[in-house]
């Protein structure tokens, strides 16, 4: 059964073809489409034929919180101005006085960090406890190549899987490419209403701070507020894709990798700046909530979201929170949930409050909202062979003019899709207008996620 979701950009059926059937969701381009993609074997490293060169599995025990990603001006964004207490700096200091073998290891680690600090931030999955005895172990690899940070992952959590939706956990074939030299854009960009926004240092995708349109009682609601995520703020979508809606540092450290229930670990105490916990699709790094407001960094501070709850986030989360800038308080982040650090480079922070990770993109994102079905629900358009299969309940919710069986581009599959003759026929969340692609008789929808400031 294919899932009908509203994504950033136009309507598109997108997803994966697995042995058990077809699963679909909406992507960024203009037509309905499903992609055939087999999950990686449990025993093989995650790879993708579209990624040039060999990827190095993350298996260096010294890799952990890591340094900052390359800054907007192309220079190394030095761990909150290279202040004491950064994870990478602490690891380097600990290597002093080691044996010759230890020095070799430290040198190799330093070389990786210098040539590709983004890859150095990825966690070592060789010691992972894994989701459970019946699940594939997590696989994660990354490298920098031709100005891009290339990451592949099978999308399996390093910790015990706790079902929070009816959807079974399944290995994926994630392959992401982001720039190693992110630049702040002239204007911010809305994150996708649903779908991929970035990925964590554990190789898990993260989505925005709202769910999809089902169930109706929690339509487009805040999944954290509604309590439908596990202890590390993740759950599975219909295609078995585990993803996070918030990032907790204690779930994204090397210690967490070898812990069955990392959500029971102690939270950061603020004695040092938070490590990198993920990367947005625009290339900017995401840190935990603690950081520095000056180069000396005598005392790290905890950064906070500028969004305040002004409504009920059980439904339509973006309408339930209002952002207010506070120039007088350096700990309040901008509308994208980020700031410029003491070294002049931009970075996001994962926060306890909405929007939890990103409120918008500061830079130019690629692939946003594409490649994965979205949300944790169970309803959506169904596979079909003829228009007669697309009647009544088989039509996607909101199909005002009914639906028809449409050929999915470049595939053999057909699905029931909403049809239209005019914009008024097209489904869209309240407050947004649908648009009819009259040539195809299919509806598209404007971008929707967190509105840029």
Image: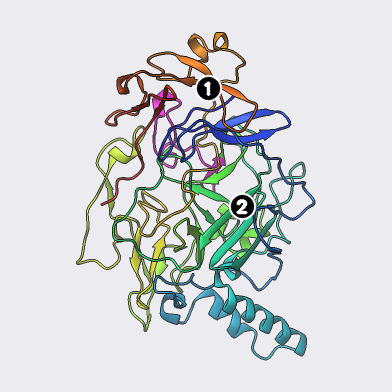
Residue at the right extreme, as displayed: 43
Residue displayed at 73% across by 51% down = 137
**Secondary structure found at label 1:** loop
Determine whether, in the image, residue 113 is placed left or right of residue 446.
right
Q: Which residue is mark 1?
A: 381
Q: Is residue 230 magenta?
A: yes
User: Which quadrant of the structure image shows residue 152?
Assistant: bottom right
Q: Secondary structure at mark 2?
A: strand
* Residue 65 drawn at (x, y percent): 55, 68
Residue 293: image tag: none
* Crowd around label 2: few <14 · some 14–19 · many ≥20 (10 Å): many
- Whether residue 277 is situated above or below residue 87 in the rendered picture: above
Q: Which mark is residue 175?
A: 2
- Mark 1 or mark 2: name the one nearer the start of the chain: 2
Front-lying residue, 259 or 216: 216
Q: Which residues are magenta?
A: 211-235
Q: Is residue 311 visible?
A: yes
Residue for point 56% across, 64% down: 149
**Label 1 neighbour load within 10 Å: few <14, some 14-19, many 20+:** many
The answer to which image quadrant residue 53 occupies is bottom right
| Helix, strand or loop: magenta stretch | loop
Rendering coords of residue 93 (x, y %): 58, 85
Residue pictured at 65% horizontal, 27% vertical: 412
Name the one closer to the observer, 395 or 331.
395
Is 28 inside the magenta-drawn segment? no
Q: Quadrant of residue 242?
A: top right
């Amino acid at each position: 059964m294919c899932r009908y979701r509203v994504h950033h950009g136009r309507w598109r059926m997108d997803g994966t073809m697995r042995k058990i059937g077809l699963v679909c969701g909406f992507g960024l381009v203009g037509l309905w489409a499903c992609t055939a993609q087999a999950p990686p074997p449990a025993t093989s490293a995650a790879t993708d034929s579209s990624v040039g060169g060999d990827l190095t599995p993350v298996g260096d025990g010294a890799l952990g919180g890591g340094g900052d990603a390359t800054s907007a001006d192309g220079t190394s964004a030095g761990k909150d101005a290279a202040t004491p207490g950064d994870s990478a700096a602490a690891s380097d200091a600990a290597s002093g006085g080691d044996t010759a073998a230890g020095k070799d290891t430290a040198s190799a680690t330093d070389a990786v960090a210098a040539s590709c600090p983004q890859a150095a931030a990825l966690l070592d999955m060789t010691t992972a406890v894994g989701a459970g005895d019946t699940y594939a172990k997590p696989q994660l690899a990354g490298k920098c190549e031709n100005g891009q940070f290339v990451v592949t992952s099978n999308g399996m959590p390093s910790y015990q899987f706790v079902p929070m939706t009816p959807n079974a956990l399944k290995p994926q074939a994630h392959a992401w490419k982001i720039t190693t030299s992110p630049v702040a854009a002239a204007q911010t960009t809305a994150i996708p209403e649903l779908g991929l926004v970035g990925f964590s240092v554990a190789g898990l995708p993260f989505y925005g701070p709202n769910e999809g349109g089902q169930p109706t009682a929690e339509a487009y609601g805040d999944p954290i507020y509604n309590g439908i995520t596990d202890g590390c703020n993740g759950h599975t979508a219909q295609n078995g894709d585990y993803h996070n809606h918030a990032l907790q540092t204690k779930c994204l450290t090397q210690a967490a990798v070898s812990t069955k229930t990392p959500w029971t670990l102690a939270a950061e105490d603020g004695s040092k700046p938070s490590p990198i916990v993920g990367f947005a699709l625009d290339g900017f790094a995401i840190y935990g909530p603690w950081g520095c407001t000056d180069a000396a960094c005598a005392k790290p501070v905890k950064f906070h979201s500028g969004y305040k709850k002004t409504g009920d986030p059980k439904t339509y989360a973006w309408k339930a929170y209002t952002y207010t800038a506070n120039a007088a308080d350096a700990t309040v982040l901008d509308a994208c949930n980020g700031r410029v650090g003491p070294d002049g480079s931009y970075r996001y922070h994962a926060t306890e409050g909405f929007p939890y990770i990103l409120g918008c993109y500061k830079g130019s994102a690629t692939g946003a909202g594409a490649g994965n079905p979205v949300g944790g629900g169970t309803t959506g358009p169904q596979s079909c062979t003829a228009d007669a299969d697309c009647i009544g309940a088989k039509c996607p919710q909101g199909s005002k003019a009914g639906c028809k069986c449409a050929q999915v581009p470049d595939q053999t599959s057909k699905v029931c899709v909403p049809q239209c003759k005019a914009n008024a026929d097209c489904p869209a969340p309240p407050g947004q207008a649908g648009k009819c692609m009259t040539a195809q008789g299919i509806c598209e929808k404007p971008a929707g996620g967190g509105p840029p400031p």
